[in-house]
Amino acid sequence: MSYKDDIHKFIKENYNIEADYPWEKTPDYSVFRHNHNKKWFALVMNIEKKRLNIDLEENIDIINLKCPPELIGSLRKEKGIFPAYHMNKEHWITVLLDGTYPLENIYDLIEISYDLTK
């Protein structure tokens, strides 16, 4: 199970923003940017679990989202939330899209990230 398609649909319906696929080597990595300033607010990727220190030899869909630094510590205590993969860990988090963290909560985090990057 992956929330990847749900995330794409949520962002399209709520912000009228389509995914951008900027990298040839990773064509399934999708970036979501504000239309007016092109700042990223979400990055959806499929990575090896071991990159998040999960001891399994398989891949997983994730989303990177910007959060206020004062929330990151408490969020990272939640199951399914990790220090940001390939982003500034002080301002970004990585969320598993495998059902570990509730989809409605991910939507809330997308809204926070969207607002922080306006």
Image (cartoon, rainbow, N blue to C red):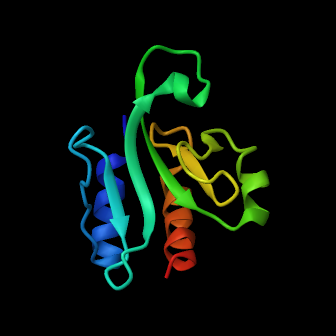
At a point 62% along the width and 54% down the height, the residue shown is: 88
Numbered disc total: 0
In the image, residue 85 lies at what x, y percent? 54, 42
Q: Nearer the viewer, residue 74 or 19?
A: 19
Q: Does residue 3 appear left or right of residue 94 in this picture? A: left
Q: Position of residue 33 (x, y in %)?
A: 36, 70
- Residue at 69 percent across and 68 percent down: it is 68
Near-viewer residue (25 or 28) = 25
91 and 101: which one is in front? Answer: 91
Up-down: is 107 above or below 56?
below
Quadrant containing the N terminus in the rendered view? top left
Q: Is residue 17 above or below residue 26?
A: below
Nearer to the camera, 47 or 1: 47
Quarter occupied by residue 24: top left
Residue 118 is situated, as x and y percent measured from the top left of the image, at 49, 82
**Outermost residue, front direction?**
24
Residue 55 picture location, percent across and down: 58, 16
Residue shown at 25% from the left, 60% from the top? 20
- 17 relative to 87 in the view: left or right: left
